[in-house]
Amino acid sequence: MKNVTVIRHPLVQHHLTLLRDERTRPQEFRRVLGEVTTLLIYEATRSFSLRSVSVKTPLAPAKGHQLKRDIVLVPVLRAGLGMLDPILQLVPDAKVGFIGLKREESTLQAIFYHQSLPPDLRHHEVILIDPMLATGGSAVAAIDLLRRENARHIRLVNLVAAPEGIRKVHARSPSLPIFTASVDTRLNERGYILPGLGDAGDRLFGT
């Protein structure tokens, strides 16, 4: 699929299998999700633009690089919270916004219940994080909101994606990059990914 990067690194696939396993308890689920998120974010940020800088080491001047744009992390509540802290360990100066969405179970439509974003996202790299890309309704709603806040550089990072969700996102935003550990088979009649890993939020928080 165009503009979809499936990260097939052996450690990513190993961790994904642990997360799929129904025997993995919430404490272990949180730990493994954090570890695999770190691996995913390395790939998701590989194409970030750099600018040249000069610094002075204890011995001599040195040429180096810094990120051209500041980073804004936007987890989709609640499951996206499980991916936030591991990324902040890598980019502790990143700003953080929050988008709260819930799915109306009868219609599968995304409903906002919270939003809190840094002002003017025009010159930032915005990373939208959510373990699951299922119907795509929440992702599209979140991306539309970010666009209204002038975000120009958005990428979506998911642990698992369904083909239906990818198609819905790219129908609205064809060039938006999606990074995932797996494109699974399909959605079931309730809008859950098959084989998936269940409800990531429930498994993350033990609810």
Image (cartoon, grey):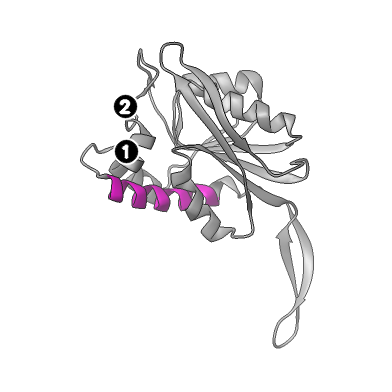
Could you tell me the amino acid type at mark 2? Pro
Q: Which residues are magenta?
A: 26-42
Front position in the image: 19 or 103: 103
Gap in angstroms between the C-alphas marked 2 and 1: 15 Å
The image quadrant where one finds the C terminus is: top left
Residue 32 at x, y percent in the picture: 35, 50
Circle 1 residue: 203
Q: Residue at x 54, y 52 (%)?
A: 42
**Neighbourhood count class around disc 1 (C-alpha, 10 Å): few under 14, some 14–19, many 20 upward:** many
User: Which of disc 1 and disc 2 is earlier in sequence?
Assistant: 2
Q: Which residue shows up at 34% across the image and 29% down it?
A: 196
- Residue 141 included in the magenta stretch of the image: no
| Residue 57 x/y as whole percent | 71, 82
Judging from the image, what secondary structure is the residue with disc 2 in?
loop
User: Is 154 located above or below residue 69 in the figure?
Assistant: above
What amino acid is labelled 1 in the image? Arg
Image-quadrant location for residue 93: bottom right
Disc nearest the viewer among 2 and 1? 1
Q: Which residue is mark 2?
A: 195
